[in-house]
Amino acid sequence: MRGRKGREGVREALTHGCRGRPRGGPCPRLAERARGGRRMKKFSFRLESVRRLRSAVEEERKRAFGAAVRLYHREREALRALIEREREARERLAEELASGCSAEVAAAFSEFLRGNALRIRAQAERTEEARMRMEEERRQLVEASKERKVVDRLRERALERHLYQASREEQGFLDEVAGVRFLIGENHLASWRKEPEKNVIWGQGETS
């Protein structure tokens, strides 16, 4: 029966058999190849600067559209307020006329209504301009979003290709490592079979 040292020596030769390997550690050459082969390439998108620029343009268009929406709402509320003032003034004038107000009071109401009508017309124009500006900003935002999405889709496809290629390289590396381990095992097994005397020397504690 072989001694413990002999059995450990044989196991060492069959399992790794790599010169210079620290006891109980991996094969240095195989580990070195593993460290180099398993490092995935960093993903790089050639249109990244374009994508960032279009994203920045889209964000600017969002801010501009938001400002245009707020302006339109302010102008519309101002127009509604003027229209409400006109309605109240006409109701008040009707009450005054029903109660037999003087001609001066009726003339004052009429003057106010004429002036308010001009203000309503001007405010309606400003409201329409604000609405048109809002719609234009909306159109530009939609266009900027489309342009950004085009580059985003290109980036997604490039990333998919990168991951697919990295997966193929990783699988190829694993296949290579398996082949290297197999060859190392076969070579040392053949060497051990050809020179049994040297292998027996490893187990000097061998007993018959």
Image (cartoon, rainbow, N blue to C red):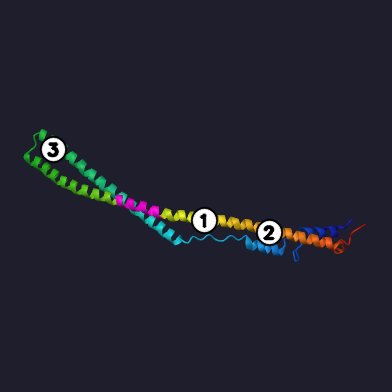
Q: Amino acid at mark 2?
A: Val
- Percent x, y of residue 151: 44, 56
Residue 197 within the magenta-colored segment of the rendering: no
Q: Using residue 72 as the reference point, say whether residue 162 is left or right of it.
A: right
Give the spatial CA distance, label 2 vs label 3: 98 Å
Queried whether the magenta region covers residue 135, the answer comes back as yes
Name of the residue lying farthest toward the left: 103
Residue at the bottom extreme of this rendering: 20
Residue 49 horizontal side relative to residue 40, left or right: left
Magenta span of residues: 134-147
Q: Amino acid at mark 1?
A: Leu
Q: Residue at point 13% right, 35% down?
A: 94
Image quarter of residue 171: bottom right
Determine the secondary structure under disc 2.
helix
Q: Mark 2, residues whose alpha carbon is within 10 Å: few (<14), some, or many (≥20)? A: some
193 sits to left or right of 125: right
Q: Main secondary structure of the magenta part?
A: helix
Residue 177, labelled with which disc? 2
- Residue 159: which numbered mark, if any? 1
Q: CA distance from mark 2 to mark 1?
A: 27 Å
Of the 4 image quadrants, the one containing the C terminus is: bottom right
| Residue corresponding to mark 3 | 93
Looking at marks 2 and 3 on the same chain, the residue that comes earlier in the sequence is marked by 3
